[in-house]
Image (cartoon, rainbow, N blue to C red):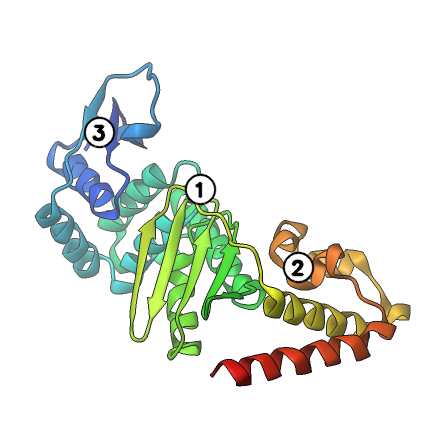
Amino acid sequence: MSDRSVIVYLYDGSYEGLLSCVFESFAKKENPIEISVQDAVQTSLYPTRTIETDFAAAERVKKGICTKMSHEAYEWVRLGYFTCHPRKEKLILDFIRVGMRCGKKVLSLLADDSVNHLFKAIKHLTGESHQLKGFVRFSVYDRIMVAVIEPKNFVLPLLAPHFCDRYANEAFMIYDKTHGAMMFYRPYQSAIVPVEDYHEPEADEEEQFYRRLWKNYYDSIAIENRYNPKCRMSHMQKRYWSHLTEMNPCLSSTSGQIQSLGKQGENIALRNDLSE
């Protein structure tokens, strides 16, 4: 296989489409200079070829990786597809090419640029998904929990098992604003689908009450003398703050409001009891 072929592969953006590009690369004995999503390419200085998604070819690539490299190496390929690396498709292809030469030891070859860069991209993906497991904030609209996130990586497939297990008997949605995708869940079914546009509905009185209650609790347990904004930002980056209830300045409440909040909670509980 040549080190480089002056051609750009175009595919439909799906995971199976990417694996079809890998199959085409090995079948034609060529290494494309780039692999890009078809709709995202405006112009190219190089000749292009559209690779149609072939599920049978994608399955053959999967089996080949698992057999020649390892199941763990295939998991790297799958996770690499979810990363925000700007050239993830080419990076994955280069990783597979190295793996087909070196076999099962490929995961330890961190001195190789393609292996190292893929490892770092996956580490960034898994780190972000781990953080969001604690930073997702749900609001309740008509008994359905809804959350909005803006991650750099496509983390919904990694978040799904955690939240589906945690809220197994609830109905909820998580909207990824960055990638235009929504994860829907109802007992015991889930799906991740593209969503072109989504606007959160207005929060009702009960939802507003619980938001203020949580904000008041957050402010009350804070130790003013140990306030360290740099430390907080190192553990909770500011890009997460816009969707964190406790970081919403409009919900600020003083200690004198605790009693009124409690009374409001009693009124809401009474209203719910009367409506049932």
Give percent across and percent down for residue 30: 19, 30
How far apart are the alpha carbons under marks 1 and 3? 25 Å
The residue pinned by badge 3 equals: 2
Find out whether the residues at labels 1 and 2 contact each other: C-beta distance under 8 Å: no
For mark 3, does the 10 Å Cα neighbourhood hold few (<14), some (14 to 19), or many (20 or more) residues? few
Under circle 3, the secondary element is loop
Residue at (91% x, 69% y) in the render? 225
How far apart are the alpha carbons under marks 3 and 2? 45 Å
Front-most of 207 and 222? 207
Question: Which amino acid type corresponds to the residue marked 3 in the rendered image?
Answer: Ser
Front-most of 99 and 239? 239
Whether residue 261 is visible to the viewer of this picture, yes or no, is yes
Q: Is residue 133 above or below residue 108?
A: below
Whether residue 3 is visible to the viewer of this picture, yes or no, is no
Left or right of 113, for residue 137: right
Front: mark 3 or 2:
2
Give percent across and percent down for residue 106: 32, 55
Under circle 1, the secondary element is loop
Pointer 3 or 2: first along the chain: 3
The residue pinned by badge 1 equals: 85
The residue pinned by badge 2 equals: 236
Give percent across and percent down for residue 195: 36, 46
Question: Which amino acid type corresponds to the residue marked 1 in the rendered image?
Answer: His
Pointer 1 or 2: first along the chain: 1
